[in-house]
Image (cartoon, helix red, strand yellow):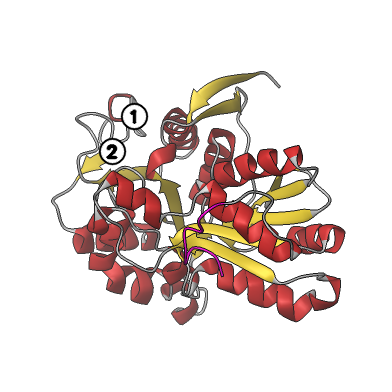
Amino acid sequence: MAVREITCSQAIAEALAEEMERDDTVFILGEDLTSNGGIFCQFKGLPEKFPGRVIDTPISETSIVGSGVGAALTGMRPIVDMHFADFVTTAMDEIVNQMAKIRYMFGGQAKLPMVLWAPDGAGISAAAQHSQSLESWLVHTPGLKVVVPSEPADVKGLLKAAVRDDDPVIFFQHKRLFKQTGPVPEEPYVIPLGKADVKRAGSDITLITYSRMTYECLEAARKLAEQGIQAEVLDLRTLKPLDFDLIARSVKKTNHVVVVHEACLTGGFGAEIAARIGEELFEHLAGPVVRVGAKDVPVPFSPVLEQYVLPQVEDILEGVDKALKRQRQVLFIPRAANVR
């Protein structure tokens, strides 16, 4: 299968074009979609190719999500663009009490094939109200599936699977990854939801991560290899359903684990992973399951402070040392509170 290097934005546009061509019930609605193809250019070319199926809406998240729910109930497959993931806060009734529960409460007589597109994450100096990672909120809601890809090929394949799914899917796309490039097959393909991926094989420790932190973990793994430590990097890709089978295979091989995410540490999804590993794989552990995440503060606007709050490669290396119960080989001042 031939491949080429494209960005995540281009991979998104390709996936949606293929799905809209395949199924005329697929359409997109949200704010500022048609003038420039979305604020991250992820819908570029779609308004022209599919007139009337890329719909600009008023600035009202409750009405946008509510319209998507109604459309999905009547046989359409809407993709609702939230502009920024932070804005789910204004539509939580529609998301948590309607999207997530309708199929169950109707006894399976109704489907809700709907994708909620939610650009998340920090690192672009967008300040506290536009820089959050809220995946653990929605993973905690039964009835929702949650996708968190990192590289363009995964973005495309998982988005196609999400569009075809008969249950509501929250699709988180990190804001800093829209310009991320990577090899993507030219032929159409689909990646099933609930399948994690080994981005780097290793035998000494497992780094479990997702979204932008995948790249930070890969850099940490490269630095660890220089010290003779082979780290395995698992990109979860979807949090719900979770590929715990792949996690288990890796943990049984390496016996050491560090879980890394950009969301703040307390109550983050890493706690769920650590708990399950502790409950189901305790006899395979040779050290503590260590979590690395952001500090428990609102994300600052200042680039310097923002970088200080977010987990860095150094934090991951410190977490590895803690998991392996070893002392640092170089003198440094700990950055504090990003590792637990």
Residue tagged 2: 54
Q: Quadrant of the C terminus?
A: bottom right
Label 1: how many residues lie within 10 Å, few (<14), some (14-19) or many (20+)?
many
Query: Does the magenta-highlighted stretch encompass residue 336?
Result: yes
Identify the amino acid type marked 2. Answer: Val
Pinpoint residue 225: horizontal percent, then vertical percent. 75, 40
User: Which SS does the magenta portion mostly show?
Assistant: loop
Q: Are marks 1 and 2 in contact (CB under 8 Å)?
A: yes
Residue at point 42%, 56% (across, down): 114
Q: Which amino acid does label 1 sit on?
A: Leu
Q: Mark 1 points at which residue?
A: 46
Left or right position of 76 against 278 = left
Q: Earlier in the sequence, mark 1 or mark 2?
A: 1
Taking the image as drawn, is residue 13 in sight? yes
Would you place residue 69 above or below residue 11 in this image?
below
Residue at image position (39%, 53%) is 308
**In magenta stretch: residue 197:** no
